[in-house]
Image (cartoon, rainbow, N blue to C red):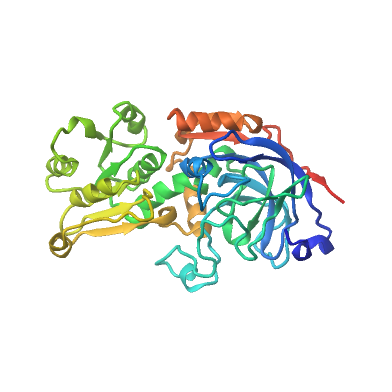
Amino acid sequence: MDGENFSVEAGIKPILCKAAVARKPGEPLVIEEIIVAPPSHHEVRVRIICTSLCHSDVTFWKLKDLPAVFPRILGHEAIGVVESVGEDVDEVVEGDVVIPVFLPDCGDCADCKSKKSNLCSKLPFQLSPWMPRDKTSRFTNLKGEVLYHFLNVSSFSEYTVVDTAHIVKIDPSIPPSKAFLLSCGVSTGVGAAWRTANVEAGSTVVIFGLGSIGLAVAEGARISGATKIIGVDVNQEKFEIAKKFGVTDLVNVEECGDTPVSQVINEMTGGGADYCFECVGLVSLMEQAYACCRKGWGKTVILGVEKPESRISLPCVDVVHSGKTLTGALFGGLKAKSDIPILLKRYMDKELELDKFVTHEVIFEDINKAFDLLIEGKSLRCVIWMDKQASYSKGVCIS
């Protein structure tokens, strides 16, 4: 940490708190006392109320090679309260309730000002272990060892420091155990249907993969008025859960035999679906999704993440003659600062149903149970409470 840049002169001191630290790949997180530095320019220090984990956390927890680094504080789905602000911060004040997000929304660059993009060019998204502006850490343990950041959030800590480009101020009356869901996964799925694909009322949707992202796509398609939502998976048991999210039909890949899934979908839909979403991260499914979206206007949206070296192969004649669209979507195409408040209002208006995504709750000390639940496929989202009796009191300051 570069202490010379911090706001000590403004009376903001380091805070001693607990964090769940990932020290070695795949090993249980360790609850440790750490020191969280004051926020620097364009930064806020946030007291986390509750957090959760998704498969990105598990992936980087297991990963042995770069971009994985250890020791690290994982976590990127959360909600918290601003405890202190650094210099040049004017959009939030101490006491504001905020949702941290992994994707920046600086509000200043051409991309952030445009309605056509959610990819900030001032602070491009990177898998960096540092704060985005000065490439240093705000975390150390009691021995002075640097602890690395994760996805610009690091919410597996009672306190964290986040750049203002990565926070969204929200209405404090919204239940935290529901609002935090829009930090990553649910926003990605709902946003892909709502913003990226712009699913229309009466349309047909196909979703490859009925995990939490796929179910969020189904929820987005449902509130957009899709009348036929087909889920594609290998697990028949997921269909009962998927029904709650608006899925009307299920195609079990293992029951298709030698018939390509795309052919089954094309026959079910009379020529292909209006919108197809790939939520697994397999090239083969991306190609199948494109093959079963309707010629003329079909749109395929890729949400799953494959290996960096993977390539999609499509027949050139099909690309030219079919009139289909293939696109990717990071964070579902949402612009965090403007779109998350809209989705939260739709939740409060009882349009968007967030409650059904929460399947479990644990206290912070039991965070490793949340990993077990997700890995075993028993959980969609597990709320990890820092303190269910949390107040707005400050942490322990270090003089």
Which is more toward the observer, 113 or 143?
143
Which is more toward the observer, 75 or 168?
75
Residue reaching furthest to the front? 65
Which is more toward the observer, 142 or 222?
142
Residue reaching furthest to the bottom? 110
Q: Position of residue 314 (x, y in %)?
A: 20, 57
Residue, x 26% and y 35% (percent of image)? 248
Asked if residue 247 lies left or right of residue 76, the reply is: left
Tally of marks: 0
Q: Position of residue 47 (x, y in %)?
A: 69, 46
Residue, x 49% and y 48% (percent of image)? 184
Q: Position of residue 65 (x, y in %)?
A: 50, 49
Asked if residue 9 lies left or right of residue 271, the reply is: right
Q: Give the answer, above or below, for where 257 lies relative to 300.
A: above
Residue, x 70% and y 65% (percent of image)? 41
Q: Give the answer, above or below, for where 271 lies relative to 128.
A: above
Asked whether the viewer can see residue 386, the reply is no
Residue, x 53% and y 60% (percent of image)? 104
Asked if residue 143 lies left or right of residue 53, the reply is: right
Residue 1: image quadrant is bottom right
Q: Position of residue 284 (x, y in %)?
A: 25, 47
Asked whether the viewer can see residue 239, the reply is yes
